[in-house]
Image: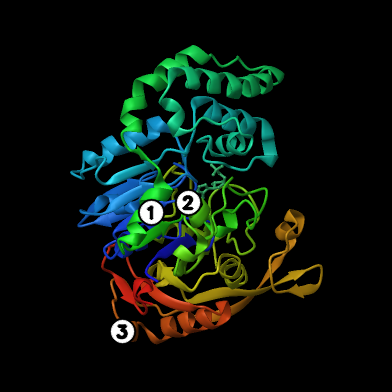
Amino acid sequence: MKNVAVVGSQWGDEGKGKIVDWLSSEADVVVRFQGGHNAGHTLVIDGVTYKLRLLPSGIVRKNKISIIGNGVVVDPWALLDEIKEIKSKGVEISEENLILSESANLILPFHKEMDEIREDAAGKAKIGTTRRGIGPAYEDKVGRRSIRVMDLISEKNLDHRLETVLMHHNAIRKGLGKELFEKNKLKKELLEIAPQILKFSKPVWKKIDEFKNEGKKILFEGAQGILLDVDHGTYPFVTSSNTVASSAATGSGCGPNTIGYVLGITKAYTTRVGEGPFPTELKNETGEHLGKIGKEFGTVTSRKRRCGWFDGVLVRQTIKVSGINGIALTKLDVLDELDEIKMCVAYELDGKKVDYLPAAVDDQLKVKPIYKSFKGWKSSTKGIKNFEKLPENAKIYIKELEKFIETKVSSISTSPERNDTILIEDPFKI
Ligand code: IMP
């Protein structure tokens, strides 16, 4: 079985872009299957930085096919802007190497506005969303009133679909004392860009079936992280899609048996953007240090990420809910200068020891981490490509982490550069 799914095992920003880019050298096809332009994958290739939001990471490589699956919510203007931006860096993007699912749901300006209206009105209860309209767009999808890529084909159909969705949105807007959203202007703007979007549109499930029959290797690229999954994450402080690996099948139209290996990208410490529980958060100098050395600012919103120790309890849990076969440990070098490194191995909740994150948000906010302490290695691991060359204390930390999460560390990333990776097990060769 040749196909691999890559997912984030924490709250996103684990460094998926680099690993996906690196794995895509072996893949023929790279597929995005959930999320939207709330994602931000940064690739550094030969000193050039590419910031991808909607486009699959395979786009920067020659002779690869990139697919945006039906499970992705697509802001058509954001997609066109991103294509333009990436093209301006010398990357070729055409119907030959980019496929957009005809059933992908669109994020429209009233979704973004609704995201903002709600976040602004929520006060302390705000989620801290990326304000891109992701949640409202997914709501319209399951509410069966969404506008999909294929709806751009006919003006009559588009008019009818807009009428339906705006009836819903305008009722809410009216209730909130906001201006009603005007249909005709939006329809005109959508029809103007329709040909530029529709040229990429194809039945993705069929293309994937063909690629499978041709023996092509497929890489499924997850966005966000499992702790942001709408079912398995720290609800309600989550995104509005399923970020677990099984979503790769529904979000692109292939069966779960298409995926042979699930790789969980895992940062050697923990970060989170936005609100919500974070048991190992460090609101002190060490947290600041991790943020500074790890350059922990959001790719999409530039927000400062909250930083904390590695939470083994959480990662062990996300590995189980997502069926992760091995992890790619990233940003190990960020820990290089620390005297002491801690790993959360259990929680205390109301005087009792617990070995998983409870589902109730109040409990999630209350749990206190129980740590295991490790001696720092105090030397540079940057750019090391061989496990044996790592400092002894770094090896001890990794081995203990591996034992605790009950899953193999299949690679270790030691800098943002594509080749600075210690490969232990190649997911495509298993
Ligand atoms: P939304 O996806 O914009 O609705 O935001 C919901 C939550 O997911 C917020 O806490 C965001 O900060 C978080 N989030 C969304 N996308 C990403 C991502 O790509 N990386 C990290 N956090 C994200």
Check disc 2 and report its element: helix, strand or loop.
loop
- The tag on residue 175 is none
Q: Which residue: 33% across, 53% down?
A: 57
Which residue position is annotated with label 1? 208
Name the spot of residue 269 as percent of width and height, x first. Answer: 50, 67
Q: Which callout, 3 or 2, points at the residue further toward the start of the chain?
A: 2
Could you say which is closer to the camera, residue 191 or residue 399?
191
Which residue position is annotated with label 2? 253
Name the spot of residue 330 as percent of width and height, x first. Answer: 41, 67
- The residue type indicated by label 2 comes to Gly
* Residue 5 drawn above or below residue 250: below
Q: Which residue: 40% across, 32% down?
A: 76
Label 1 beta carbon less than 8 Å to ligand 1: no
Q: Quadrant of the N terminus?
A: bottom left
Please state if 132 lies on the left or on the right of 164 as rendered: left
- The residue type indicated by label 3 comes to Lys
Asked if residue 41 can be seen in this view, the reply is no
Mark 3–mark 2 Cα distance, whole angstroms, equals: 43 Å
Task: Check disc 2: other Cα within 10 Å, few if <14, some if 14-19, many if 20+.
Answer: many
- The residue type indicated by label 1 comes to Ile
Check disc 3 and report its element: helix, strand or loop.
helix
Label 3 beta carbon less than 8 Å to ligand 1: no
Asked if residue 258 can be seen in this view, the reply is yes
Which residue position is annotated with label 3? 389
Check disc 1 and report its element: helix, strand or loop.
helix
Label 2 beta carbon less than 8 Å to ligand 1: no
- Label 3 or label 2, whichever lies nearer to me, is 2
Task: Check disc 3: other Cα within 10 Å, few if <14, some if 14-19, many if 20+.
Answer: few
Are the residues tagged 1 and 3 within 8 Å (C-beta)?
A: no
* Residue 148 drawn above or below residue 242: above
Name the spot of residue 423 as percent of width and height, x first. Answer: 33, 76
* Residue 201 drawn above or below residue 266: above
